[in-house]
Image (cartoon, rainbow, N blue to C red):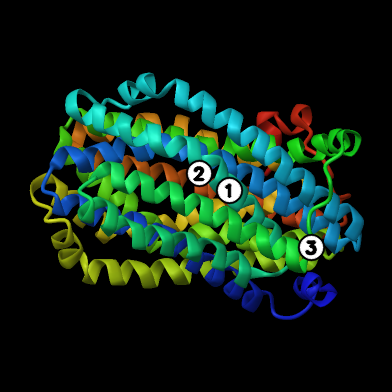
Amino acid sequence: MAEAQAKFLTGNLFAHITVMASTFSIGLMAVFAVDFIDMIFIAMLGKEELAAAVGYAAAILFFNTSFGIGMAIAAGALVARALGEGNAVQAEARKTHALAYGAVFGVGFAALVWTQLPWLVTLMGATGETADLALSYLRITVPALPFLMIGIIGGAILRAHGDARRAMMSTIWGGLVNAVLDPILIFGLGLELTGAALASVAANIAIAVTALRPIVRFYGGLGRPRLGPMLRDLGPILAIAAPAILIQIATPVGQAIVTRAMAQFGEAAVAGMAIVGRLTPLAFAVIFALSGAVGPILGQNFGARDHARVRRGFSDAVLFTAMVIALVSAVLFALRGPIADLFDASGVTRELVFLFCGPLSLLFFFNGVLFVGNAAFNNMGRPFYSTVLNWGRNTLGLVPLVLGGAWLFGPAGVLVGQALAGVIFGSIAWALARQVMREALAGAAPVERSDFGRQGRLLSLFHLRR
């Protein structure tokens, strides 16, 4: 086990990044592929309002999932840092406490969202039968999201131990459960959208069980949570989790803005957006996985005070991002026709799919750079940087670009504005991360907690004039 924990402190960093991101992404693809297949099944039912309902529901579900990802980032960063420092006792305590807090906060957050579902569905712009369908889907899926949160945190802990394969398998098992149940419930039992929701609930439970099992079996299990130690760990956990959650929630806020802007163009436009929304994480699963995969690598080397390898790991991650984006974009462009045909897309729906599979997919590179920057900031004690950049992208950047794009170019302008916001703030993240790396390499003392006062200043954010 010690060998696995120390694997990121030696050897080829690009190879470690490739293995961690690839294995993590395979697990994510198992889940995203099922979501993608869900959309195909729903399109086969021939009801446009069902596809639109999924689009509205996805924007709301994103809030719950993002909360879990934020907790997982904190768990992975703290456990990885403790392992890098050689403190196995602290690592075991923090994984126990992170899971305990994840369960408590997950239930509370899901309950809050569930009580506000009618208001949230209306806020997204859904009306009539489409709103009713989205609401019924969410009332089934939201209560099961705490299981997904536990599974996500468990996977982060496994990756902090260097066990990318078992972290991957937890999501693969969840994807398989969903893939098997979807056709049975949607078509076999005729439950349509309700069947898709029930399959998602079962998948979330499977992910939680298969993520916790290897932690118990191979990595010392889970200790008994005690109030005193839990309260002591609450500060370090929240120091990373709070800004990380704010970072993650910024994305569904941005998606909600996009959904609302697209709703004015009708259900066909929302259906096109929903297809793109399902296609994006499937096509770029490796990029979505990169932040969680590179985090333990940067965290262990930062804990070992090897700042040169932290800087090299960041550069290799950006190079890896560019290679993946170029390859995937070429494939999407070549297959744009068959992809649109899978959903029997026509009119504006087909136009939006073609737009994404053309130039917009290349611009996703800047989102990937932002993901890598998030991992660097979170694991080097600068989570506030990630918070400001992600909220800036999803509010200050997104609102004027999306609304302006919608006014000038209609539904296509909404997607173009969303992509341009990623370009601007991904570029800022790249420059800022390089500055943080230079300071660390020059011998700056590592920052162990977030300093919201000093780091919150605008000049400190850009920090480039020194």
Q: Which mark is residue 206?
A: none
Q: Label 3: which residue?
A: 300
Q: Which mark is residue 425?
A: 2
Q: Disc 3 or 1, which lies upstream in sequence?
A: 3
* Label 1: how many Cα within 10 Å (few below 14, some 14–19, many 20+): many
Q: Secondary structure at mark 3?
A: helix
Question: 323 or 340, which lies in front?
Answer: 340
Residue 321, how many percent across, how many down? 50, 65
Question: 129 or 185, which lies in front?
Answer: 185
Residue 79, how many percent across, how many down? 78, 55
Q: Is residue 44 visible?
A: yes
Q: Amino acid at mark 3?
A: Gln
Q: Secondary structure at mark 2?
A: helix
88 displayed left or right of 216:
right
Residue at the image position 40 percent from the left and 49 percent from the top: 200
Q: Nearer the viewer, mark 3 or mark 1?
A: 3
Quadrant assignment, res 416: top left
319 displayed left or right of 101:
left
Q: Secondary structure at mark 1?
A: helix
Q: Label 1: which residue?
A: 429
Q: CA distance from mark 2 to mark 1?
A: 6 Å
Residue 66, how many percent across, how many down? 53, 41
Marks 2/1 in contact by CB < 8 Å: the verdict is yes
Question: 347 or 462, which lies in front?
Answer: 347
Which residue, as the protein is rendered here, is positioned at the far left?
Answer: 347
Residue at the image position 15 percent from the left and 47 percent from the top: 349
Q: Tell me the quarter of the image containing the N terminus.
A: bottom right
Q: Tell me the quarter of the image containing the C terminus.
A: top right
